[in-house]
Image (spheres, rainbow, N blue to C red):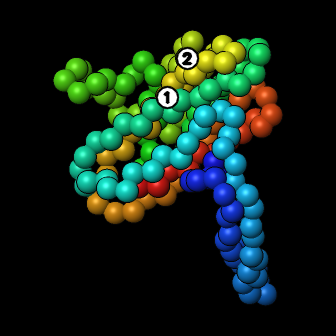
Amino acid sequence: FIAQQPGEIYGKIAVSTTAGVINYEVSGTAKPNSYGLEPVVHSRAIGGEVMHHPVSVFNPFNDVMQVTQVSTNDTFIQLLAPGEFRPVGQKRTPAGSSRILPERAGAAWTINPQETSIVGYAKFSLPPGKYRGFINLKLDRDPSRILIPVSL
């Protein structure tokens, strides 16, 4: 899990059971991650505006690292493979989907040592409101799964 900022984090988890709700207080310390990943945070999302956010990954290892999956279960997040993004003024950018297939990503998912690669783009086109979700990133090593929080 990628925290929104480094430091102490406190929260509550509510577990619903047949006997009622059980509340747990939790805490932890968030540290900057070695993959250079940051949360996707936009505090001023304007309704109807289309936003694209690159998902960049740094390989901190001395050997090649492979991204094996980029996906989301949140319907407001549409994912694009690196070659599908079109800057303003060029051909229209595709709609996106909840998963980037490896064959659409090409070589961008093979990251050389000490290099950064854009492994996809998150696309948002939303009515005004608040949205929270996650982008799921899977790698060929530990940790094999990283959740990138999205907050609009």
Q: Position of residue 8 (x, y in %)?
A: 69, 62
Image quarter for residue 137?
A: top right
Q: Position of residue 131 (x, y in %)?
A: 43, 59
Which residue: 39% across, 22% down? 84
Q: Indicate the amino acid at tag 2.
A: Ala
Location of the C terminus (image quadrant):
bottom left
Q: Secondary structure at mark 2?
A: helix
Q: Indicate the amino acid at tag 1.
A: Gly
> In the picture provided, is 117 more to the left or to the right than 124?
right
Image quarter for residue 117?
A: top right
Up the image or down, 23 lies above or below 86; here it is below
Q: Position of residue 27 (x, y in %)?
A: 74, 67
Q: Which residue is mark 2?
A: 108
Which residue: 24% across, 20% down? 91
Q: Which residue is mark 1?
A: 120
Q: Nearer the viewer, residue 43 or 88?
A: 43
Marks 2 and 1, how far apart at CA? 8 Å
Q: Position of residue 24 (x, y in %)?
A: 76, 77
Which residue: 25% across, 55% down? 47
- Which badge, 2 or 1, comes first in the chain's sequence? 2
Q: Residue furthest left?
A: 89
Is residue 137 shown to the viewer in this render?
yes
Q: Secondary structure at mark 1?
A: strand
Q: Nearer the viewer, residue 68 or 143?
A: 143
Query: Within 10 Å of the Cα at label 2, are there few (<14), some (14-19), or many (20+) other Cα atoms?
Result: many
Which residue: 67% across, 23% down? 59
Q: Tell whether label 1 touches label 2 (CB within 8 Å).
A: yes
